[in-house]
């Protein structure tokens, strides 16, 4: 949605009535002979001036604060548009379009007391908008996480055997015929394989992880009389002198297949214990090696899908569909809530932004025209494509004429205060 460009301008009254300044500003750029825009009176409250040094410091900080608040306003607006999609409508400020709010601006004395020191007032405004920004981040992250969970559920629901919830596709009678182990030493895992890989998988399954398990033991050839007797071999026993795969021979079973993949079960050793031993009088405890995770990693590297942590539970059939429906409801509710939040807080952030603009006009005017405070500020709604002509007209009346179109953004090079505003 395109919005008009505004220029906020102030000139010194030079001791004359403000009405004279207002007429001068109107005749310069918003009259039949200079139809460059529509002009509105801008109410600038009587704010606390403080010291010249504090005003100069504040002037530098206000430009940064202005940019930060603008970015937050844009962020809230963008979030609202993305949430609404094709149903997006223009956001309002206090129930009215932002353009009308700008053109009918009135200082909110209850929210932003004008007799507070300027630095405190700016801090009050910026902290309020920062809180909006932080809340938007948190809400957006929560909404994004919930969306991701919904997409993952949809992927699993509509996917092949590599991703689908197996409880939804496995029948109890099929599972009953499978040899499934989950003991202290053995674990049966489900593995989904793409159809293009089936032949390779079936050929290599019993050799996969051939370096993982140590099947070696004591060498009895040098001491045949000790065979079967309790003997402390300690660190002299090399379990890894003979290595092999953790897959139990003959345990591979085909469970089912779909158009894209085949589901198998295979039983593997859960782990391997490296015995402890004595070093002199000190006992070094043994260690247990997790073979399941190491074997699963090898399968993943081969692009086989290990359905880890799956345990068949017939009572879970259909629950994934119910969960997906629940997630959809939660996502829709969160979207509606976040959309309402954006509509409300866009207005709050925009109000803060407009107040910062007015404070900038006040500070720049006092620095430019001195004390006592005596200036008139107006708001020009620039006619389409007339930006440069309007500023040139102001320069012709109140100062030097612009030579370069790029100078429009240089707010420092005019004999009057000029602040661009693109809501």
Image (cartoon, helix red, strand yellow):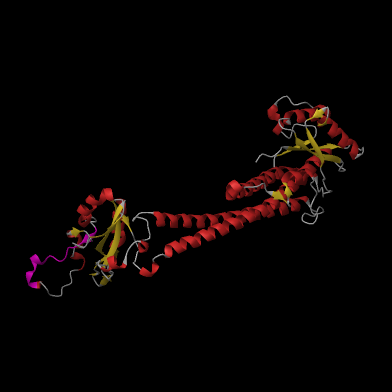
Residue 161 occupies quadrant: bottom left
Q: Is residue 213 magenta?
A: yes
Q: How many marks?
A: 0
Q: Nearer the viewer, residue 381 or 416?
A: 381
Furthest-bottom residue in this view: 230
Q: Is residue 289 visible?
A: yes
Quadrant position of the N terminus in the picture: top right
Q: Nearer the viewer, residue 281 or 337?
A: 337
Residue located at (72% from left, 54% from top): 124
Q: Is residue 366 left or right of residue 228?
A: right
Position of residue 251 relative to residue 59, above or below, is: below
Q: Is residue 290 visible?
A: no
Q: Is residue 228 left or right of residue 361?
A: left
- Percent x, y of residue 271: 27, 65
Quadrant position of the C terminus in the picture: top right
- Percent x, y of residue 8: 77, 39
* Magenta segment: 212-225
Q: Nearer the viewer, residue 406 or 221?
A: 406
Furthest-top residue in this view: 403
- Percent x, y of residue 78: 61, 46
Position of residue 74 relative to residue 182, above or below, is: above
Q: Is residue 337 left or right of residue 38?
A: left
Q: Is residue 112 magenta?
A: no
Residue 319 occupies quadrant: bottom left
- Percent x, y of residue 183: 27, 71
Q: Nearer the viewer, residue 164 or 371?
A: 164
Residue 249 occupies quadrant: bottom left
């Amino acid at each position: 949605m395109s919005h008009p460009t505004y220029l906020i301008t102030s000139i010194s009254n030079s001791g004359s009535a403000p009405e004279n300044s207002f007429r001068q500003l109107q005749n310069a750029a918003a009259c039949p002979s200079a139809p460059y825009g529509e002009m509105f009176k801008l109410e600038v409250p009587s704010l606390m001036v403080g010291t010249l040094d504090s005003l100069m410091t504040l002037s530098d900080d206000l430009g940064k604060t202005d940019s930060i608040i603008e970015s937050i306003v844009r962020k809230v607006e963008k979030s609202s548009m993305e949430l609404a999609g094709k149903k997006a409508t223009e956001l309002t400020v206090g129930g009215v379009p932002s353009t009308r709010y700008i053109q009918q601006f009135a200082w909110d004395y209850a929210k932003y007391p004008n007799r507070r020191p300027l630095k405190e007032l700016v801090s009050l405004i910026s902290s309020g908008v920062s809180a909006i920004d932080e809340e938007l981040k948190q809400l957006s992250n929560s909404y994004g996480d919930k969306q991701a969970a919904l997409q993952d559920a949809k992927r699993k629901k509509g996917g092949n055997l590599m991703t689908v919830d197996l409880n939804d596709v496995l029948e109890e009678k099929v599972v009953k015929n499978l040899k499934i182990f989950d003991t202290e030493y053995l674990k049966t895992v489900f593995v989904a394989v793409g159809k293009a890989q089936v032949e390779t998988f079936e050929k290599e399954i019993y050799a996969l992880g051939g370096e993982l398990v140590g099947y070696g033991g004591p060498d009895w050839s040098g001491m045949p009389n000790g065979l079967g007797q309790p003997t402390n071999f300690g660190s002299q026993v090399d379990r890894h002198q003979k290595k092999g795969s953790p897959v139990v021979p003959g345990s591979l079973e085909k469970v089912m297949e779909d158009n894209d993949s085949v589901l198998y079960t295979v039983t593997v050793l859960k782990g391997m214990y490296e015995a402890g031993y004595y070093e002199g009088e000190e006992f070094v405890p043994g260690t247990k090696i997790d073979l399941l995770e190491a074997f699963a990693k090898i399968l993943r590297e081969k692009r086989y899908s290990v359905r880890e942590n799956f345990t068949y539970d017939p009572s879970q059939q259909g629950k994934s569909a119910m969960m997906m429906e629940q997630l959809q409801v939660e996502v829709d509710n969160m979207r509606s809530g976040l959309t309402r939040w954006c509509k409300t807080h866009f207005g709050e952030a925009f109000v803060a932004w407009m107040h910062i603009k007015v404070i900038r006009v006040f500070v720049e005017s006092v620095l430019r025209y001195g004390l006592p405070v005596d200036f008139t500020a107006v708001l020009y709604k620039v006619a389409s494509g007339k930006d440069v002509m309007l500023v040139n007209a102001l320069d012709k009346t109140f100062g030097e004429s612009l030579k370069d179109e790029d100078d429009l953004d240089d707010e420092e090079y005019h004999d009057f205060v000029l602040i661009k505003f693109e809501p």
